[in-house]
Image (cartoon, coloured by chain):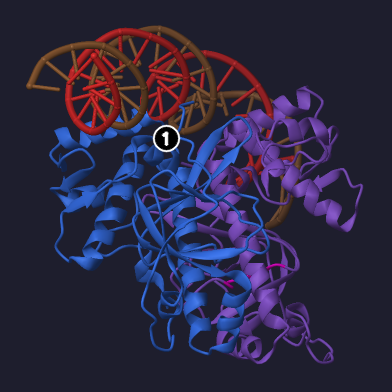
Chain colours: A blue, B purple, C red, D brown
Amino acid sequence: MHAMNAGQRIDRFQLIPIAAKPAPSTIEALFKKQTLCQVEAGATLFYEGDSASHLFEVVQGVLRIFKIIGDGRRVITGFLYPGDLVGVSLKDRYLYSAEAVTDLRFRRFGRREFQDAVNASLELRPELFARLCDEMAAAQNQMVLLSRKNAEERVCSFLLEHLRREQRTCPNASIIELPMTRLDIADYLGLTIETVSRTFTKLMSRGLIAPEGRHALRVVRARGLARLTGGEYEDDNDFPMRSRHN
Amino acid sequence: MHAMNAGQRIDRFQLIPIAAKPAPSTIEALFKKQTLCQVEAGATLFYEGDSASHLFEVVQGVLRIFKIIGDGRRVITGFLYPGDLVGVSLKDRYLYSAEAVTDLRFRRFGRREFQDAVNASLELRPELFARLCDEMAAAQNQMVLLSRKNAEERVCSFLLEHLRREQRTCPNASIIELPMTRLDIADYLGLTIETVSRTFTKLMSRGLIAPEGRHALRVVRARGLARLTGGEYEDDNDFPMRSRHN
DNA sequence: TCGGTTTGTGACGGTTCGTAACAGCGCGCA
DNA sequence: TGCGCGCTGTTACGAACCGTCACAAACCGA
C-alpha cells in the first residue's frame, strides 16, 4: 500500500475575525455567527474515535473524511466542499477522521449548542433532516459504486459527480478542479492510484476528457462519460429505474 | 449475472388485529399502535423511486433493501430485522426497494403522521436521530468492507455481524440463521455466489464454522473469524483505532 | 416422485493489483 | 539561475484474486 501524507494534528486554529450577522434562519446562517477558522492543507480536524465535541461547516477549500482499518488500508468516505456540514450524523464519537485536502476555511459549532439551536427552531430541523438524507443517499450510491462498478465506471461516476458540482454554481462549466491527489481519488473509489491513472489516460485517449493543468481537467463529452457510469446520470432518455414510481 | 426471484408487488396487505396500547414513549411503542401486516417471502414492500408514503417497522422476519443499476446488477444495501425501521432517511421518494426475505410481519406508519408525532415529542426525536446515526455508521462500515476488504474478510465480517445480532438476544449463542440465499449474501458483500460458496467451504475446512442445516451455521471459533475480518471486531486486545481518542 | 431452484466445485480467464522504473513538477539551496 | 532532491503521477509487466462458465449435487415445493 502507498504512503500518505500524515497531517499534523492542530490544537489551536488560526482565528479570523468576522462581522456579526442577523438572526439565523437556516443552518448556514446559524454557522455564520461562528468564528471562521483556517488550517493548511494536510491538517487534521479530528480523528475517528475522538470525542465528538464539534460540528464543522466547510467555508472554503476541500476536506476529506476517511476511515482506516487494521493494516493501514484507507477508505475515503467522502470529500466535502464549501457549504457542506461535517459530523452531523454522530452520537458521541466521530465515525471517521477529517483532514484538509487544500488550505481550508471552516466554522465550528459545539455539538450541544448546535443541538439546542436545532431543537429550538422549527426551520432548522427539517433542513438538518434533509442534509442527513442527502448524506445517506450519497452513502448508498457509493455502496453501489464500490460493490458493482468496474474501474472505468467508478472513475466516470466520480468525474460526473464533480462536473455536477461545478455546474451547480456555473451551469455550463466543463472544467473540473481535482485538488486531491490520485491516492485520494483511489482511496475514494476503492482502486489503486495506478488504476486511476490508467483509466484517466484511457478516457483522455478516447477524447472524453482533456488535461487542464495539473489538478484540473476538461470534460469534453459529458454525455459520453454518462454512458460509461453504469447506471446513473442519464438525463433525458427514459430510465427503467425512474419510470416505475406509481 | 444471475437471475433473481422477482417478488410480486403487494397492494393489499393481510391485516392482523392487534390490541391497543398505552401512550407511546419510544418509537417502538409508537409503532405498536399501528396495524400489524403480513406478507410472504419474496413480496415487495416498495420500489426505489416510489413516492415515500410510509415508514415501516419490521416485527418478525427479515427484509432486504437494495438498489439495481442499469443492466440488472443488484446491490443489497442492508438486511433488516425485527425492531429495525425502514425508510427513516428519506425525503419524498424511497432510496431503495424493499423485499421480504422470509415471511414477514411489519407495521406501517404514514410519513406525515410519523413526522408530526416525532415533532410533538421530546423523547422521540433523540431516538430517531440515534437510529439515523446507527444507519449512517452501518453504511460507512459497509463502504469500508466493499472498498478494501477481500472475499474472506467480507464473509467473516458478515458472519460476525450476524453472530453479534444473535448474541444481543442470546448472549452466548453460536448458531446463526441465514435465511437469505447465497445470491443475497453475494449481492450484499459485493461478490458472486461462487465466491461466497467457496469462502464458506474454506472457513469450514479450517474449522472456524460448521454447517447447521441448510440455512444456518455454527460459529466454532469466533475469535478466529474476528482475526480474519481485517479490522474490526477485536474485543479485548489493544486496537490502534481505539487507543487514539483523546 | 419429479422438475426447478439453489448450492457446491472445478477449470479457466480477465480485471485489477503490486512492484518497479521513469518522467514531470516544485522547492530549496548553492 | 542552475542544480539536485523529493513528491506525485505515468506506464509496463507479471501475479493474484475473483468472476465467468460449466456441471453435478442437494434441496424444496408441487
Query: Nearest the camera: A244 or B117?
Result: B117
Q: Assess whether residue B86 is covered by the magenta stretch.
A: yes
Q: Residue at x 57, y 64 (%)?
A: A54
Q: Quadrant of residue C13?
A: top left
Query: Nearest the camera: A220 or B54?
Result: A220
Tell which subunit mark 1 falls on.
A
Residue D7's place in the image compared with A163, above or below, is above
Secondary structure under tag 1 reads loop
Magenta residues, as a range? B84-88
Query: Nearest the camera: A168 or A157?
Result: A168
How many neighbours does mark 1 have within 10 angstroms: few (below 14), some (14-19), or many (20 or more)? many
**Residue B222 placement (x, y as % from top left):** 82, 36
> Does any portion of residue B64 appear in the rendered image?
yes
Secondary structure predominantly adopted by residues drawn in magenta: loop
Q: Residue at x 57, y 51 (%)?
A: A96
Left/right of residue C21 with respect to residue B103 in the rendered view: left
Instruction: Point out the image quarter for the C terminus of chain A.
Output: bottom left
Q: Quadrant of residue A112?
A: bottom right
Q: Quadrant of residue B230?
A: top right
> Does any portion of residue B42 appear in the rendered image?
no
**Residue B187 placement (x, y as % from top left):** 55, 46
- Name the residue beneath numbered marker 1: A191
Q: Assess whether residue B33 is covered by the magenta stretch.
A: no
Left/right of residue A86 with respect to residue B133 in the rendered view: left
**Residue A124 placement (x, y as % from top left):** 50, 83
Q: Residue at x 14, y 49 (%)?
A: A221
Question: What amino acid is found at the position of numbered circle 1 in the picture?
Answer: Leu
**Residue B241 placement (x, y as % from top left):** 66, 41
